[in-house]
C-alpha cells in the first residue's frame, strides 16, 4: 500500500469519524438527567450508559491490528464506522435504559476500532511531506472533541432534543463512509492471519476489570471487596495476557515493543499528559456547575477557548514537527500547560471568568503543541515497518486507560480532599466563636425579616453556614486536585527530558509508517 496524492478527502473522513467517536465519550453526560426521567432509571442504572461505552471501547481496541491485517485497513474502518453509525441510530431510538446500554455497546465497539484503525490508515496513505499536517488535523478529532462536548450537548439539551446527541451522528457517519469508500485505497489483506482468541479474552477481561475498578472505585470504596476483586482480576488477566503474547507466533498485541526503551518512555510521557489533561477537563465543569451554579451551556462556553486554541495550534505543530522535531514542541507545550495550570490552582468563587478564559486559552496552546506530538513519540521509536500497527494499538490502549485513570483518580482525590477540608473548617466554624455568633445573628435577623419565626430563622442561618463551609471546602479540594494535575504534567516534562529524539529519527519513523505493508 503506497501513499496517495489526493488523500485529504479521506483524511477528512477519518477525522470526522474519530471526532464523533471521541465526542460521544463525554457529550452524553449532560443528557443524563433527561434520560433518567424518560427511562425511569436510577442514578446507578443510568451511569452504565456512560460506563458501558468506555469499557467497550477499551475492550475492542486490541482487535484493531488483527482486523487491519486480516481484512484490510479500509474495509475494517468502513465496518467500524458503520457499526458506530448503527449504534448511534439505535441510541436515538432507545425506549429503555437497557436498550440504550445495548445500543451504546454497539456504538462503542465501532468507535474504539475507528480511532485505532483511523490512525494507522493515515500513516499508510499520506505522503511523507504531508504526514505532519495530516496527523495534526487528526489530533483535532482526538483532543478537541472532549473539550467541545459540553457546549454541544448543552445546546442540544436546552434548545433541541436530547436524542439529537446521538442522531446527529447519522448523516455525518454516512458522509464519512462515502468519502472513505471513494477516496481511500485498500491495503493488502492476509486472509490466513490467525486470530489470537485466547489473547483477546485475557486482554478484554483485564482492561474491562481495570477500567471498571477505577470508574466505580469512589462509589463502592477502594478497599471494598468488589473493587479489590476487580483489580486482582485485572492484574491476573494482564499477566496471563502478557505470557500468552510472548509465547504465541501470532500475538494479538506485540508486547515485546515495551523492551524498546524509547517506545516505553514515549508511551509514559503521552499517558501522563492524558492524565493531566482530561482530569482537568472533568474537574473544571464541577467548579462551574456545582460551585458557581452555571448551566451546562455556560460551562461549555467556559471551556471553549481551550478547545479553539488547541484546534488551531495542533495542525500547525504537525507541520513544524518534521522541521524542528517532536521533543522541542512537547517540552515547550508542557511548559505552557504547567504555568497556566498552576495559576488555575488558585481559582476561587471570586475569580473572574475572563481570567479563566485566558488561562485555558494558554493551556490550549500548550496542549496543541504536546498532545498529538507526544502520541507520535512511541511510533517514531519503532524502526520495523511491520510493527508500526502494533505500536498504534498499544498507544491507543494506553491513552484510553490513562484517560480513565486520570479522571477517576482526580475526581476521587477531589471527593476525599473535600471531606478533609470540610472537617477542618467545621472544627474552626463553631458557635463558640464570637465572629460566628455575630454572623449567625445577622442571618437570623435577615430570615426573621422574611417572616420566619426565631427558631426557623436560626435553623436556616445554621444551614446557610453549613452550605458555605461545604462550598469553601469544595473550592480547597478543587485547588488540591488541580495542583496534583500540574504535578503529573511536571512528571511528564521531566520524563520527556530523557527521551532521545531527533529530526532524522522522526523522518525515519514516518517513512516506516508509510511504507509498512501488511502481509
Image (tube, grey):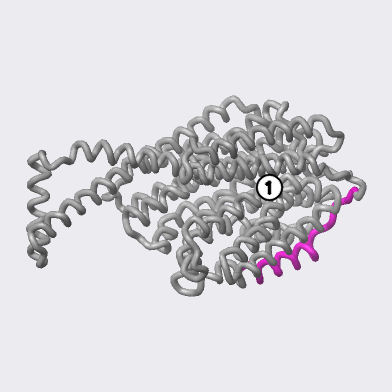
Split into 4 quadrants, where in the image is the C terminus? top right
Q: Which residues are magenta?
A: 169-190
Q: Quadrant of residue 7?
A: bottom right
- Disc 1 designates what residue? 59
Where 157 sits versus 348, above or below?
below
Residue 418 occupies which quadrant of the picture? top left
Residue 374 seen in the figure: yes
| Magenta highlight on residue 512 | no
Find the residue positioned furthest to the right.
192
Residue 241 percent location from the top left of the image? 73, 35
Residue at 51% over, 58% down: 148
Residue 38 placement, left or right of 427? right
User: Does residue 277 show up?
Assistant: no
- Label 1, residues with CA under 10 Å away: few <14, some 14-19, many ≥20: many
Q: Looking at the picture, does residue 367 appear above or below residue 246?
A: below
Please give the name of the residue rendered at 78% of the width and 33% of the height, measured from the top-left corner. 244
Residue lying at the far bottom of the rendered structure: 160
Residue pictured at 49% horizontal, 52% vertical = 309
Picture coordinates of residue 439, whole percent (x, y):
11, 49
The secondary structure type at the circle numbered 1 is: helix
439 relative position to 390: left or right: left
149 and 144: which is toward the camera = 149
Amino acid at each position: 500500500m503506497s501513499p496517495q496524492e489526493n488523500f485529504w478527502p479521506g483524511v477528512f473522513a477519518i477525522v470526522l469519524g474519530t471526532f464523533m467517536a471521541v465526542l460521544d465519550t463525554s457529550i452524553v453526560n449532560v443528557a443524563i438527567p433527561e434520560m433518567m426521567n424518560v427511562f425511569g432509571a436510577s442514578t446507578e442504572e443510568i451511569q452504565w450508559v456512560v460506563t458501558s461505552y468506555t469499557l467497550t471501547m477499551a475492550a475492542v481496541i486490541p482487535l484493531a491490528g488483527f482486523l487491519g491485517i486480516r481484512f484490510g485497513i479500509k474495509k475494517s474502518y468502513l465496518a467500524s464506522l458503520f457499526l458506530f453509525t448503527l449504534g448511534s441510530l439505535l441510541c436515538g431510538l432507545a425506549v429503555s435504559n437497557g436498550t440504550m446500554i445495548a445500543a451504546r455497546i454497539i456504538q462503542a465497539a465501532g468507535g474504539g476500532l475507528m480511532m485505532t484503525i483511523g490512525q494507522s490508515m493515515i500513516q499508510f496513505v499520506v505522503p511523507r511531506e504531508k504526514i505532519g499536517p495530516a496527523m495534526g488535523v487528526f489530533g483535532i478529532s482526538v483532543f478537541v472533541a472532549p473539550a467541545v462536548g459540553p457546549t454541544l450537548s448543552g445546546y442540544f439539551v436546552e434548545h433541541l432534543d436530547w436524542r439529537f446527541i446521538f442522531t446527529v451522528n447519522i448523516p455525518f457517519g454516512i458522509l464519512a463512509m462515502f468519502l472513505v469508500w471513494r477516496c481511500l485505497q485498500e491495503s493488502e489483506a492476509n486472509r490466513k492471519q490467525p486470530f489470537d482468541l485466547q489473547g483477546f479474552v485475557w486482554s478484554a477481561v483485564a482492561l474491562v476489570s481495570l477500567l471498571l475498578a477505577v470508574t466505580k472505585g469512589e462509589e463502592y470504596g477502594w478497599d471494598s471487596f468488589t473493587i479489590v476483586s476487580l483489580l486482582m482480576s485485572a492484574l491476573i488477566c494482564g499477566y496471563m495476557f502478557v505470557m500468552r503474547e510472548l509465547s504465541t507466533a501470532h500475538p494479538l498485541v506485540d508486547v515485546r515493543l515495551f523492551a524498546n526503551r524509547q517506545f516505553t518512555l514515549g508511551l509514559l510521557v503521552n499517558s501522563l499528559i492524558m492524565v493531566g489533561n482530561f482530569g482537568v477537563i472533568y474537574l473544571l465543569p464541577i467548579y462551574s456547575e456545582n460551585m458557581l451554579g452555571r448551566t451546562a451551556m455556560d460551562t461549555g462556553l467556559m471551556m471553549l477557548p481551550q478547545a479553539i486554541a488547541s484546534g488551531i495550534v495542533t495542525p500547525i505543530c504537525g507541520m513544524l514537527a518534521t522541521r524542528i522535531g517532536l521533543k522541542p514542541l512537547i517540552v515547550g507545550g508542557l511548559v505552557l500547560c504547567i504555568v497556566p495550570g498552576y495559576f488555575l490552582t488558585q481559582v476561587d468563587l471570586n475569580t473572574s471568568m475572563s481570567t479563566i478564559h485566558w488561562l485555558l486559552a494558554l493551556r490550549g496552546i500548550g496542549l496543541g503543541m504536546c498532545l498529538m506530538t507526544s502520541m507520535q513519540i512511541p511510533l517514531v521509536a519503532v524502526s520495523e515497518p511491520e510493527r508500526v500497527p502494533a505500536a498504534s494499538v498499544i498507544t491507543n490502549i494506553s491513552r484510553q486507560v490513562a484517560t480513565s485513570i486520570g479522571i477517576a483518580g482526580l475526581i476521587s482525590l477531589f471527593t476525599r480532599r473535600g471531606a478533609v477540608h470540610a472537617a477542618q473548617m467545621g472544627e474552626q466554624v463553631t458557635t463558640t466563636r464570637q465572629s460566628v455568633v455575630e454572623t449567625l445573628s445577622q442571618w437570623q435577623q435577615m430570615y426573621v425579616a422574611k417572616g420566619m419565626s426565631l427558631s426557623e430563622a436560626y435553623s436556616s442561618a445554621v444551614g446557610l453556614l453549613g452550605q458555605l463551609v461545604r462550598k469553601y471546602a469544595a473550592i480547597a479540594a478543587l485547588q488540591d486536585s488541580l495542583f496534583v494535575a500540574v504535578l503529573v504534567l511536571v512528571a511528564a516534562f521531566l520524563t520527556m527530558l530523557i527521551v532521545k529524539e531527533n529530526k532524522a529519527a522522526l523522518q525515519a519513523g514516518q517513512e516506516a509508517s508509510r511504507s509498512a505493508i501488511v502481509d
